[in-house]
Image: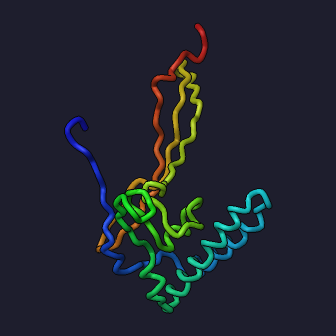
Amino acid sequence: QKYFEYECYVTKCGIRNVHFMGTLDDWKLLRRKTQELKKFTTSDRNNFETYINAVLPVLDQFIETYQGNIDSEFWNKIMDIEHVGGGRSGRMAGKYVSGWFLRLCYGLHTKSSCEIKQIKLNSLNVPILVNNEITNESKICYVMGGFHGVESSDGRHKPVMSLGIIEDTSTIKPLHQI
């Protein structure tokens, strides 16, 4: 990194087609279960209800598309990326994302646009204390999970979720004093 800068660009070449996995009943069940999540909101967590209300119309469009009722305007507005330089635009220089994709991002679901760096794919990171009676060692391991790649086949792409366990060797200590 001493001599180079690394950058990644997301182009706006478009999504040519969408392949829905699962059955129509699966999508209807997902929509119904998402609607039911609103029952668990309280007045101090109103932002979550707003999030659910933003996601439901997207799920409705998915179901309509699955049934063959394609709304081209909806699908043409998944995501746009705008490169903004400094100056009179009123926004700081950067790459900005807009489109209904933001409705799926909790915390960004009410925004019409945001800087691309605000979109996070958070990973699960759970510490586990491992006590090994055989080796007489105690240590911390972490279960890590989340979206870690893209699987591509026959021109179709889907996110890959995975889990892994990472050992923190700096935490190894004797379990019992001998």
Between residues 146 and 139, which one lies in front from this camera angle? 146
How many numbered markers are drawn?
A: 0
Q: Nearer the viewer, residue 36 or 115?
A: 115
| Rendered view: 93 above or below 13 | above
Q: Residue at left 44%, top 61%?
A: 91
Q: Tell me where residue 12 appears, x and y as whole percent.
A: 33, 71
Is 143 drawn above or below residue 91 in the view shown? above
Q: Residue 150 location, x and y as percent? A: 37, 61
Instruction: Give the residue at x 51% y 76%.
Output: 22
**Which residue occupies the extreme right position in the image?**
43
- Frontmost residue, 17 versus 50: 50
Residue 4 falls left or right of residue 130:
left
Q: Quadrant of the N terminus?
A: top left
Residue 89: quarter of image: bottom left
Name the image quarter holding the C terminus. Answer: top right
Q: Position of residue 51 (x, y in %)?
A: 64, 66
